[in-house]
Amino acid sequence: MRLAAVDLGATSGRVMEAVVSVGTGADRLDLTEVHRFPNAGVPIGESLYWDVVGLHREVLAGLRTMARSGPVHGIGIDSWAIDYGLLDRDGSLIGNPHSHRDRRTDGVAGQVLEQVSAEEVYAVTGLQQLPFTTIYQLVASRGSAALEAAETMLLLPDLLGYWLTGEIGAERTNASTTGLFDVRSRTWASGLAERVGIPSAILPPLREPGERVGWVTPAVAVGLDLPQDVPVIAVGSHDTASAVVGVPAAQDQTFAYISSGTWSLVGLELERPVLTEAARAADFTNEGGVDGTIRFLRNVMGLWVLSECLRAWHEQGSGADLGTLLAAAADAPALRTVIDINDPSLLRPSTPGDRMPERLVELARRSGEPVPDDRATLVRSILDSLALAYRRTVRTAGQLAGLTVDVVHVVGGGSQNELLCQLTADACGLPVLAGPSEAAALGNVLVQARALHADLPDLAAMRALVRRTHSLRRHEPRSGLDWDAAESRLASTKDGSTP
Ligand code: LFR
């Protein structure tokens, strides 16, 4: 079968064509990029928005290209989580969706947690405290004309699916990231929403990955030159949920995963949430995975920090090529400057008046670490600090869940960064299996393929197919670097306390 995976990231989006066949003696899971397009937050005044109509246009362009060269048996959409659009009573989008990196949520989490205790919130939602979670965005917009006019809130993949099919709903893995979802009953936490002044009526009916969202509308079918019986299928519409489906883990190993892109999502797949006080204190999240699994993980700031440095240098007119920088970073002194890569000062986009490279230098200074003196040492410091954060997170996840991790799988774009993967193996003291880089798109099509009756009964079968059809790079841990000492150095700084 020939399936379209729409996979939207914060810096680029793509429409991928997948050809899937299972059980025919010649298994196939071939992905081809049909259309790739840039994405970025768009500043207007003090606010930061997504150009969601532009994203819809690019999705249509990709689907049209795919339709020209053959049949399309299904379409699935995944994107980053948390962000949403509001629909009015006519079903029209109200305004532009905000980016979670917008400043409107500054201080809001603190206000909410004065109203409902952090313990109580964690017992219901099981989520890490991220300042920009949907609940905080909606609280920030209480009293706004937009929220007053809103009939429905749609997370971004559900909004794009609505524009293709006319059907309204909320796919469960992404709903689980909103802070408005009850991790145990697996339904909306309507009571919590109402307590903090969010009208629960805007939360649409939930759907499971694998359910049909609907058929493309006649207008979409005509515009794309598609037949009208092309289904849009709900996949793990949170990109991280799809990426975890695409982790090529073997069944006999306990694996941790790092879904490495703009953010790095680091954790374990579990059958049940871990809602202990220790998990809350360590700020671990229990997001919903495909097939009722739990993604027990933490957000680590990720390659965002590096890509914002590249952008800042580029805007300054002295742009450098990533490959050259990484080669120089490989030769730079190891573990010279380690910083808390999760520091909130790194969250916002780099601007000419507040550039990411300078923020990192400032953070090193504040932490009493040697200040990076050139680009190679700065990049090395980012990668060492990421590896250190991965190490702490993998170890803490294992302790909290009572599991001994055998192997770390790195998937997503960051799996191509060989230096980072090697440092991750060294830091964790565990083998790292790197790839595939397109795990989210693979997870997206695997769930579609099953919904369309491919013989992929469970996650193990899906992962076995990824293993049979994709080659992975293995990094063995090397000894020689003192990661324990680097970790203690970091822990002794004020900002190094986050796990
Ligand atoms: C990764 C991701 C993370 C989520 C962040 C913001 O792309 O979806 O899982 O916390 O983006 O939505």
Image: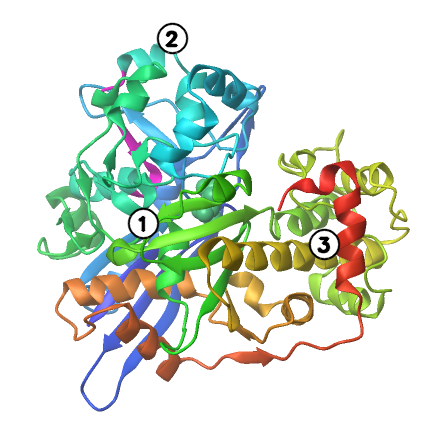
Q: CA distance from mark 3 to mark 2?
A: 41 Å
Q: Earlier in the sequence, mark 3 or mark 1?
A: 1
The single residue placed furthest to the bottom in the displayed view is: 25
Mark 1 residue CB less than 8 A from any atom of ligand 1: no
Q: CA distance from mark 1 to mark 2?
A: 29 Å
Q: Nearer the viewer, residue 348 or 286?
A: 286
In percent of width and height, residue 203 lies at 24, 28
Q: Is residue 472 magenta?
A: no
472 over 356 or under it: above or below? below
Q: Which residue is mark 3?
A: 385
Q: Quadrant of residue 168?
A: top left
- Label 1 CA crowd tier, 10 Å (few <14, some 14–19, many 20+): many
Q: CA distance from mark 3 to mark 1?
A: 30 Å
Residue 370 at what x, y percent from top left?
A: 90, 49
Q: Which residues are magenta?
A: 150-157
Q: Are marks 3 and 2 in contact (CB under 8 Å)?
A: no
Q: In the depicted view, which residue is nearer to us: 24 or 188? A: 188
